[in-house]
Image (cartoon, rainbow, N blue to C red):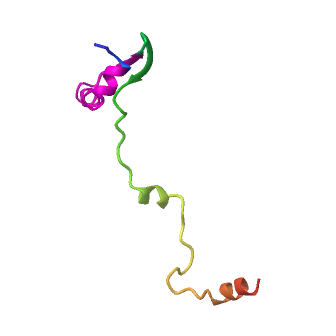
Amino acid sequence: MKRVVSATEFKAKCLAYLDEIEQRGGPITVTRRGRAVAVLGPAKKTPWKSPRNSWSKRARIVGDIVNTDTSKLWDAVRQK
């Protein structure tokens, strides 16, 4: 069942309506002067993905990243 509430009522009971949406799952239409101005519904549930896994397919380590001599690179930067 679709629920319709005024903006004034929604402002006064906002957290209660958010709890209701979370539990019931149905949308709530907020009206101002009899016109619908917003429809609030539950957020889509998406599985959590580790950022580490997403970068593992995009980045590639080339060479030795621990024992690298960067002194030549820093010398070139200092000379500019």
In which quadrant is the C terminus drawn?
bottom right
* Residue 49 locus on image (x, y percent): 38, 50
Which residue is outermost to the top? Answer: 34
Is 58 part of what is drawn in magenta?
no
- Look at the picture and state if 42 lies above or below 62: above
Q: Is residue 24 visible?
A: yes
Residue 35, picture quadrant: top left
* Residue 41 locus on image (x, y percent): 35, 26
Q: Measuring 71% from the left and 83% from the top, which residue is drawn there? A: 77
Left or right: 41 in relation to 57: left
Q: Nearer the viewer, residue 3 or 50?
A: 3
**Prevailing secondary structure of the magenta residues:** helix
Is 24 part of what is drawn in magenta?
yes
* Residue 44 locus on image (x, y percent): 37, 34
Residue 1, picture quadrant: top left
Left or right: 8 in relation to 22: right
Which residue is outermost to the right? Answer: 80
Q: Measuring 35% from the left and 48% from the top, which residue is drawn there? A: 48
- Look at the picture and state if 78 lies above or below 33: below
Left or right: 67 in relation to 8: right
* Residue 39 locus on image (x, y percent): 40, 21
Q: Which residues are magenta?
A: 8-31
Instruction: Count the marks.
Output: 0
Q: Nearer the viewer, residue 63 or 40?
A: 40
Q: Measuring 53% from the left and 71% from the top, which residue is drawn there? A: 61
Q: Measuring 44% from the left and 15% from the top, which residue is drawn there? A: 36
